[in-house]
Amino acid sequence: MEIQVVKLLGNYGAFSESFEYSLELKDKIDGLLEQTDNMTSRATDPENGLRQTVISALVDHHEISHKVQENIAVLEGLEHFSRVEDILSQYEVFMDSGKILQAGHCIQQAAKTLELSPNAGVASSHITRSLSEQCTRMTAAIDQMLDDLIAHAIHYQYPIDDNNSQFKITISYNIKVPSLAFPRSSMDSTPGSIRWHELIRALTLLDVVQEKLRPLQKCLTRQLLQPLIQRHNNSVLLIHNSESYVSAKETSISLELKPGCGPGDLFEDVLNVFKFIQQSIFLKDYSSPEFNTEEFSSDTEVLTHFLGRYIAMEACSLISEHYLAVTVPTGISELSNYATVASAAMHLEDELIAMGFLTEADRKLREFVENIDVHYTNNKRDTLLQLGRAVITSEDFKTIQVKDLDKDVDPDTDIKESSVSMNAKQLVEMILSTLHEAKSLSVTASPHLYKATRSLVDLYRALMPVHHARALTTVPALAILFYNDCMYIARELEKVPARLDDGIPGMDEVQYDDIIPALKALAKKWLDIQVQKQREELMQSIEDANDFQDSGVDSNFEAYERSMKQIVLVFKHLGKAWKVLGKLLDEVSKRVIKSLEELTDISEKESHKLAALCGLLFECEDQFDSAGPLVEGAEDVNDDEDPIHFFVPSWEKFQLITDILELSFAEIMTRFRAGQLHMFEEGELADLICALFAETPLRKHNLDEIEQGHPVALSHHTY
């Protein structure tokens, strides 16, 4: 305890010093805290504090900086607009001097500068919009200036009337620059003039050469080349140009129509036109110290390709259509002489290719002349069909007998044969001559001529029934003539393979197997139409005969006689269509037989009258007296057989009933017992006897005999 007290007392002095030092530090800290409070109070004072002062200074600095930036942007905009104005200030000078290309560059540069605005404010400003609109107007002014320059450079003179039949194109090499339409910034500038090549250069580099020179392109084609080619024998080509473009003021080319005054050398004239285009319009081989030759050479190539190629191709098409096609020979002997024309055409095409107007792929003229044999056949086909149409539509129906056309017919035989029209003869001759020409052509061309003959037959089948429909329907003789014509043409076509043993080049066989049946079917169709019409008329004639009632009365007999003569007239009109004649005559004879068998009381006078009426029909037998080559079915008739009995099965019965009307009762029974009346049924024969003869024991006896049936025929043919 004492020890602790001793230590405490021993450190008291040090403790006392430390305590005093602590009090000093406290006083200093209190002073610092007081100063800090004072400083804080000064900084945070809302009116005079340092914070408010700093904030105010920062606001002032920001406002000043914004104004400075605005002023900088304005200065940049003014510099930007000044650059654009400097660029556009050259525009009027270039336009007045006709330097369209430089003026265009000014506008392009100004537009590009406007797009590169230094800031968004300048880009959206009213001045920028105004300058952009001004550039647009200036661009339109350049386009209008180009149109005006071209209008001043190219002058077209069109024919006014028959006394002024000249078309002329004049190109001025010195072109006056028109005044600008918009207000000028400088009143001192005056318009000048430019040369033709400078205008072409501007058109080419501004890529508007096709658009601006299209009228010139069309005029060269339509107003110069087209009439020159179509009317070359009446056209005079005049060209006025200078050997030196540098000193030349203008150049011109004209076409004057003077009937009969043309030089006739079409290909030379056409070539001269293209030489003029190349040298005087496109300025081929032009050179001058003041002009870049290489640049203009490329311009010439552009003009030749985009303008000249179109003109050249149109010219070749016109030559092919209006000269080469027209001069294609119409005769096989003239075909070899076409080589001169072909050579001249290909020479022209070679020159156009060498001049750059055409390429090897554009050889239309060579393609045409190398296929001249095909064009010849096409021309021959058109001519053939044109002539054939004239023959088919002809109203001349002169006839000729077939035996006079067929060399195989024995001239010593006197055979009455069918007749055909001279028109059918002409058509057959046209077909055969065309096939003969085909034999001397190439394998490519010959089949075309063969097809042309088929087209001619098709034209005949299509046109004849339409063009002559009224005549074929109303005139029996023409219907039969048409039938004969079709059969004759079909027969001649059947002979073609035998006539052309060697065929024609390019074809294994020349035949018309598909056409021949169609021709025959057409003949039958129209014959059937006429036959039906005549059948109706025949039946009407029999109806008009009133079933031959009271034929003993003179007035009745005269009426019946007219009806029977009309029937005979119809048959004579029908000619030699034996199958048709036979069918109609068979129907007529059956109807007459039926009418006679239905008569119940025939006086002796009526009997003679009826026999006379029936006798009129015997004139129809003459129609079957010989078989011409066009008589269908005549080959089926036996040599010892009468054709009328073959084609008219009821004819023998008709002859017999006519005889019965004139025979005595005894003569009728004699024929009956001889088996010569076998064509009649027993009842038919009995009714006729009852009508012709009065009732007597003899009639009853004979009727009983007839009822027993026909005796065995002694001699007759069964048909």
Image: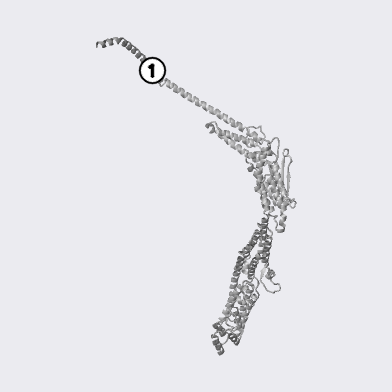
Q: Quadrant of residue 529?
A: bottom right
Would you say residue 218 is visible in this rendering? Answer: no
Q: Which residue is mark 1?
A: 36
The image shows residue 187 at horizontal and vertical percentages of 65, 32
Q: Answer above or below: position of 314 versus 393.
A: above
Task: Work out which quarter of the rendered image holds the N terminus and state it.
Answer: top left
The image shows residue 596 at horizontal and vertical percentages of 58, 81
The image shows residue 48 at horizontal and vertical percentages of 42, 20
Task: Work out which quarter of the rendered image holds the C terminus and state it.
Answer: bottom right
Q: Nearer the viewer, residue 533 or 682?
A: 682
The image shows residue 690 at horizontal and vertical percentages of 56, 85
Q: Residue furthest left?
A: 1
Q: Quadrant of residue 675?
A: bottom right
Which class describes the residues within 10 Å of circle 1: few (<14), some (14-19), or many (20+)?
few
Side of 58 where 330 appears, left or right: right
The amino acid beneath tag 1 is Thr
Q: Answer above or below: position of 101 versus 530.
A: above
Colour theme: one colour
